[in-house]
Image (cartoon, rainbow, N blue to C red):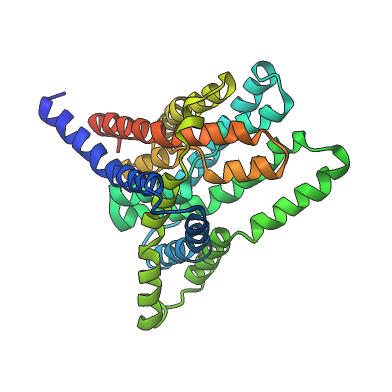
């Protein structure tokens, strides 16, 4: 490996990760200076979740030239990676995580990544519109799987008499999820072969889409709690290492096993190696898991997972795999 190749790989990794870290840093700084408050973050997060991000995903899919049959192997690799991490974390939790409310939170922290905000943004930075399109297709399937597996692993913390009703309520919310609705609608729209919407509608959608990722990243940075992040317990550290070390390495293994193309390999790694999903905290709290543990995992992996992603992409770039 030449020095030039190493420099190019590091520059590539820096270029795709730095914008995300910079926007998160901006959000953190604005919150510290009281330029952002909880009310703004709540409203902005709802705007992103209910309108801007669904719009971005919908347009990314219907405007893409992605061959879905060619992406089938990537989707298979993604499902295999998710199940591998899920069952591996379940087995580990059975023997090494003693407290019942911690088990499901640990498992979710290991297998569930932040695809909607972090991964999709990095994939777009790395591969442009192609990365956004492939990432949206990948996210469409895996988001549903993530939520179903989260319900399964967190259900152990519920009282038996309430389990059925609460699980049913969460599943209903999954299928009311604006991101899932947007993606399913886009897939149907694309399958029917409809033309792009009229220009005024498309332009409005593009403007709304443009604020999705920057605003989401600023809000994510504003919600970081450094004190919680540094106050890690043994279990949260184990889950965090699972998310930022074990999960990326397993994604590389699956990428090699499925013989993915360079772009598919890169998208798989980016989608799997991002920090813990923000939704993991929400679901843990809703289903009676240890929400403090979930918050610690989220905070720690949000900061250090981005660094790990950059290092991993640089390494894979040097190997010529992405």
Quadrant of the image containing the N terminus: top left
* Image x and y of residue 215, in percent: 40, 57
Residue at x 65%, y 54% (from the top left corner): 174
Residue 234 to residue 226: above or below? above
In the rendering, at what x and y percent does residue 122 appear? 35, 46
Q: Identify the image quadrant of the C terminus.
A: top left
The residue closer to the viewer here, 57 or 293, is 293
At 70% across and 37% down in the image, what residue appears? 154
Q: Is residue 171 left or right of residue 144?
A: right
Looking at the image, residue 16 lies above or below residue 197: above
Q: Quadrant of residue 315?
A: top left
Q: In this view, does 50 lie to the left or right of 285?
A: left
Query: Which of the 4 quarters of the picture holds residue 200?
Result: bottom left
- How far from the left and from the top, in percent, is residue 7? 15, 31
Where residue 144 appears, as percent x and y from the top left, is: 60, 50
Residue under the image location 54 percent in, 21 percent down:
238
Residue most extreme to the right: 161
* Apparent side of residue 75 relative to residue 256 in the rendered image (left or right): right
Visible residue check, residue 232: yes
Q: In this view, does 196 lie to the left or right of 172?
A: left
Q: How many marks?
A: 0
Residue at the front extreme?
34
Closest to the observer: 277 or 66? 277
With respect to residue 160, does 106 lie above or below? above
| Residue 69 seen | no
Q: Which residue is drawn at 86% across and 38% down?
A: 160
């Amino acid at each position: 490996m030449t020095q030039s190749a190493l420099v190019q790989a590091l520059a590539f990794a820096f270029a795709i990760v730095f914008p995300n870290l910079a926007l998160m840093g901006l959000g953190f700084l604005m919150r510290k200076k009281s330029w952002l408050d909880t009310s703004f973050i709540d409203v902005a997060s709802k705007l992103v979740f209910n309108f801007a991000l669904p719009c971005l995903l919908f347009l990314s899919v219907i405007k893409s030239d992605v061959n879905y049959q060619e992406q089938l192997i990537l989707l298979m690799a993604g499902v295999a990676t998710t199940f591998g991490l899920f069952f591996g974390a379940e087995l580990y939790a059975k023997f090494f995580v003693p407290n019942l409310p911690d088990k499901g939170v640990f498992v979710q922290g290991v297998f569930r990544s932040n695809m909607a905000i972090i991964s999709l943004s990095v994939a777009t930075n790395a591969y442009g519109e192609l990365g956004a399109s492939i990432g949206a297709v990948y996210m469409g399937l895996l988001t549903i799987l993530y939520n179903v597996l989260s319900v399964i692993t967190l259900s152990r913390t519920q009282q038996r008499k309430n389990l059925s009703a609460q699980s049913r309520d969460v599943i209903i919310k999954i299928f009311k999820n604006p991101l899932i609705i947007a993606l399913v609608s886009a897939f149907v729209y694309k399958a029917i072969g409809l033309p792009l919407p009229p220009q005024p509608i498309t332009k409005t959608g593009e403007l709304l889409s443009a604020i999705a990722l920057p605003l989401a990243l600023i809000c994510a940075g504003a919600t970081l709690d450094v004190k919680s992040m540094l106050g890690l317990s043994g279990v949260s550290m184990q889950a965090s290492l699972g998310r930022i070390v074990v999960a990326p390495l397993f994604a590389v293994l699956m990428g090699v096993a499925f013989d993915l193309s360079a772009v598919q390999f890169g998208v798989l790694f980016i989608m799997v190696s991002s920090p813990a999903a923000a939704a993991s905290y929400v679901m843990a709290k809703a289903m009676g898991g240890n929400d403090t543990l979930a918050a610690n995992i989220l905070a720690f992996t949000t900061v250090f997972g981005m660094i790990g992603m950059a290092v991993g992409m640089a390494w894979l770039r040097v190997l010529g795999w992405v």
